[in-house]
Image (cartoon, helix red, strand yellow):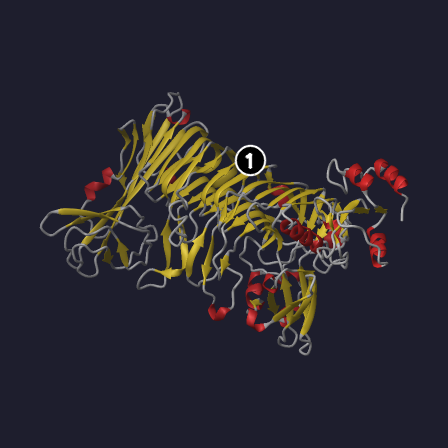
Amino acid sequence: MLNRRKFLIAAASSPLNGAVGFAAGSNQEYLATAKEVFVSRSAAKEWLASGARLRNGEIFVADQEAYRWRNGAAWIPDMPNVVPQSVPSPKHFGFDPNMRWRQLQEGDLDGINAKVYGPYREAGTNAINGFLLADRYAREAGMGLCRAVGDYFVRSYIRKRADGVQSEWPFDFFAERPDDIRVAIYRADVHKALPKDHGLFGSEIAELVHAELSPSEYSISLNPNGMGGIIRYTPEAGSYIDVCRQFDIKAKWSHSHHLWTNFQTFQIGLNLAASGATWDGDRVIGQYSYPASKPSNRGEHGIVLGSSTGYYTSRPPTKRSDVTLRALICRAASVKKDDNDPFVDSDPSTLTGVFGWITRPSFKVGTFGRSNTKSNMLFLAHWGGKYTPPGGIELLDKTSYALEETWHPEDVKLVFLSQIDRGAHGFKKGWELAAVAGADIGAVTHIGVSHPYWIGVGDVSDAFACDEQRKRVNRAKISVSHQTAIKIAPDPNSEYYGVLYKGTGTSKFEKYPGTDISLQRHGELNVICEGHTIEAVTGTLEAVRLRQFRGCVDLGDCRLLNAKKALYVLGGDGEWTAQLQKFDGLIHVRNNARGSLQGTMVGGPQFRSLGSPLSSTQSGSKERATLYAEGQIFSFITRTAVKKGATKLPIHALKNAWHDINAGDQLDIELSNGSKCSVHATGLFVNGAMSVGVTELPCHLPENTTVIVAQKGVVTLNNAVPSSIPVWLYATVSQDDGDMQQDDAAVETAYITNNGKALGHACKR
């Protein structure tokens, strides 16, 4: 035992004093009142093992951590009758911040890894049990606060290989209940090749080899103290067993220095798993490899930090509120053929995110350092849903089985602590919102990404949203502060666009009646942006795309440079507006009639040009503004007679790929007696659809009645600021060659107006 006076002097002079160990301001108090002081935790354990005792409430100190005596306490498995004094930490439970890592630069390793760079772990004991035990104690003791200071390594994955005889495997991490553990199997005929060929870590392999076991197929017995247990299962010879658990944070945490997360789980690594849960940390390094038990389509192989009530799940979630996260994140270096850790490979991921019914999440996130491991995006907010799994076996990935109900992130608050840099972290995208119910997104600069951000309505929009959220999903206001994107570079062969607003989703388990075509669902958007500054790589096709949306989108003050199309609006009856301060590409509005432009770039003298700028050399330049409004007229024919009051029109299949009928489109019908009537489409119907949903028919329609769809292309210039910059106007109508009865309607289908006066007129092409 260390002399208390000498220990006080050593602790006060230590450079770690105040940085590692006691909560701020409590160091001297606990040392001065402690009944015993030990230089190490092991010394304290030996003292306890010798039969030493204190009175209830008395304090002793070991390795700069304070403990309180409590008769009968079993919170610390290897220290009976003892509990943490004040705020618990992993060190109270025997887990030290002993993780050691270094930042690799190109060429630091062998020739195989000549281009490898990023964080590289060299040592560290798995401390996940310490975090989980401290979290459990804080929660159950009503403290609601944990802390960890120093560099920790945590890993929540284990793999055992079956030999066809063995039926029991111990696993060595903490769990409160057996149902906290998920078990999956892999076939060895594929995995035996993995150490030789890392190229096999592809999504197609994962789909073939992964299967999650039903709880009826295995059993788990936990040790009494929760530290480990036994799994019982007899797989086929040569199979692998994966036992996975998320790192769930249910209390509030404060972390300093570095946390290295080696999560091999199928959902989220550090998961904020309860209302009010908080992770307030410094730097987190995320690492995991593809052989983990997680699907190929979950946010590019998992999420490092976040909060989830479930993606596709078989049980309704519990609503979670007011989770908070602050962290800087970097992916660990991806190192091949390393003997230090067989799973040192680091695979692509999304860094942070919220899934499912999370209300008022507040995230302050960013990156640090650089890594050769790519990240899909910095932040994702995504809906979650309930389904009934076939045979009771829950699948980990997005499935084609019918959704029964969905839950959505709500009132999301996102603040960025750094730039989003593709060069340093491999980002393909900055951030994304998929079917959320309100959000407030902070300003950020994107560098080199393909897509600065996406906002979409989700696969099924709000069609299956829970009753409490249905009226807010996609309709609640999303506020976006100024987004700056430098040198965006989407793939011109497959991606086309930078920023994307997507008003449709593909419901994979629903089909258009009479076809095998997946149903497309429309959704509303309600977005107000402060503005955009986008400098695309020269030749990028589109800086901003608005696709088939309903509702309203205000793009704010826009400077859109170096893209062939500065703005492309395609389909839908959504209302959009933009203040154009500068652009040098084409503004192309196709089959959308509710857009308006303001700003200095559209306030000069207008010049009308015939034809389409897409087929001419006059497609926009740095010297002038070019606006193009394009409409289309097409028709379809009813397949059978339809009664008055019907809400479906049976039709011969729409065949042209561009002839989508959008929710809200007006459908004009000319009857045999010369009268006319109109209905409106109630959903999105694509080519191949054999019926169209409409508002109630006002009259009977005979078989082979022609229905005309005139989708207007209109751009409105509202109070444009006067300038000397010339504005070139194009307006064109694409017209079906079928049985058309309203050729003269073309002139009314595409045009550009300035304060109500038509400036560009349609011409048929």
Q: Residue at x 41, y 49 (%)?
A: 468
Q: Nearer the viewer, residue 652 or 18?
A: 18
Amino acid at pointer 1: Val
Pick whichever, 511 or 673, lies toward us: 511
Q: Quarter of the image containing the C terminus? A: top left
Residue 658: % across, % down: 34, 50
Rendering coords of residue 385 (x, y %):
46, 56
**Whole-percent x and y of residue 413?**
52, 39
Query: Is 158 situated left or right of 16 in this image?
Result: left
- Does residue 632 appear anywhere in the picture? yes
| Dot 1 alpha-carbon crowd within 10 angstroms: few under 14, some 14 to 19, many 20 or more | some
What residue appears at the point 66 percent right and 74 percent down from the top-left corner?
A: 238
Which of the pair 261/574 is nearer the observer?
A: 261
Q: Which residue is mark 1?
A: 444
Can you say whether 479 is above or below 63 in the image? Answer: above
Left or right: where does residue 78 sit relative to residue 314? Answer: right
Q: Please state if 293 lies on the left or on the right of 532 as rendered.
A: right
Say above or below: 625 vs 317: above
Against 69, residue 343 (above or below) is: below
Q: Residue furthest bottom?
A: 165
Q: Is residue 333 visible?
A: no
